[in-house]
Image (cartoon, rainbow, N blue to C red):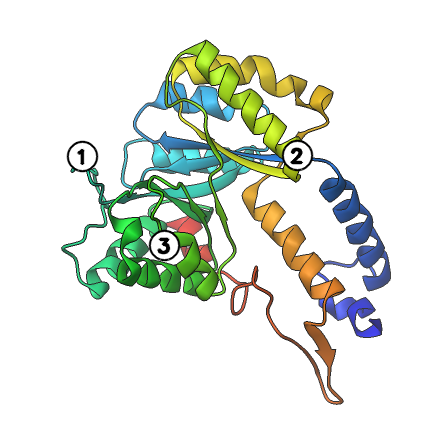
Amino acid sequence: MMALLHSRYWPGKLPGFLFLLTLLTTSHRLLAEPQLILIIDDIGYNRALGQQTLELPGPLNLAFLPHTPFSRSLAEQAHQSGHTVMLHAPMANKAQAKLGPGGLTEEMNPEQWRATLLDNIQAIPYVEGINNHMGSQLTENTEAMSVVMQVLQQQGLFFVDSLTTAHSVAQREALKAGLPSLKRDIFLDHVAEEDAIQQQLDKAIKRAQKRGISVAIGHPYPETLSVLKRELPNLSQHNVSLVGASQYLKQHLWQDNIWNDNFWYGNQSDHFTPSKYQLQPFHRPAFEARTTH
């Protein structure tokens, strides 16, 4: 444990011991309170609705469609506002609905999947993770999901399975790749009516209270935004707090590395074996490029 207290392990000038105590205290407080990961999909085509989404209480997880008119500018604003920026990656669906630009289809070969996904990632500044847009067909394709997770691991991004099919293999392949991953629990607005959305939000809150965490996905529909604007400020009354997916996964990475046997120390240098939440290694080699292009 003493190796963990060495200041060279921690960014900035905060002494390692104080940083450790601060992180332990913060992690315990955050993890003791039920948390809601709220993802808003399909941002990028409508500036006004995107702007209204950014103004909701956060932190939120905002998923941007690639190569859309307002995705870049809204993603930059989202980052500045403290929200988690995600790529909403279009993937082939069984209904054959149009994917829009940057779609991943079953007709592609592995190199095309890789190149298209990388191009999509580069199109969204400050991206930290992705989830699938549609994808009921492609997320059942083991080869495609394996390629997707390899790319995400190399880019230092997490994955959230929108779970548009009960037969998705996406999270299984993410875990095989050692990728931080989550899956959707609740769709808020499959029925885009305020009463129905309220019922789904209530389910998401109750699930968080029961399990400690809940992952809900909604869209920038006027009805959804109206409910969220009204209800999100009241989450504390339910003893539930919003959390970014990236922050939640990092909390679990921290817990795994401190409290299990994954840390071990050699005579010459310190080593650790990655946990199931950690990339190999957890880094973003292309992050600077993605924020400046």
Q: Secondary structure at mark 1?
A: loop
For the residue carrying disc 2, how many other residues have a C-alpha within 10 Å: few (<14), some (14-19), or many (20+)? few
In the depicted structure, whether residue 261 falls above or below residue 26: below
Q: Secondary structure at mark 3?
A: loop
Residue at screen point 23% across, 64% down = 110
Q: Nearer the viewer, residue 95 or 1?
A: 95
What residue is pinned by disc 2?
210
- Rounded to the nearest whole Å, what is the CA distance between mark 2 and mark 1? 36 Å
Residue at screen point 73% across, 27% down = 239
Residue 41: image x %, image y %?
39, 32
Q: Cβ–Cβ below 8 Å for labels 3 and 2?
A: no
What kind of residue is marked 2? Lys
In the depicted structure, whether residue 290 falls above or below residue 10: above
What residue is pinned by disc 3?
169
Residue 176: image x %, image y %?
45, 65
What residue is pinned by disc 1?
97
Residue at screen point 74% across, 64% down = 258
Residue 15: image x %, image y %?
83, 61
For the residue carrying disc 1, how many other residues have a C-alpha within 10 Å: few (<14), some (14-19), or many (20+)? few
- Rounded to the nearest whole Å, what is the CA distance between mark 3 and mark 2? 26 Å
212 with respect to 97 (left or right): right
For the residue carrying disc 3, how many other residues have a C-alpha within 10 Å: few (<14), some (14-19), or many (20+)? many
Is residue 242 in view from this perspective? no
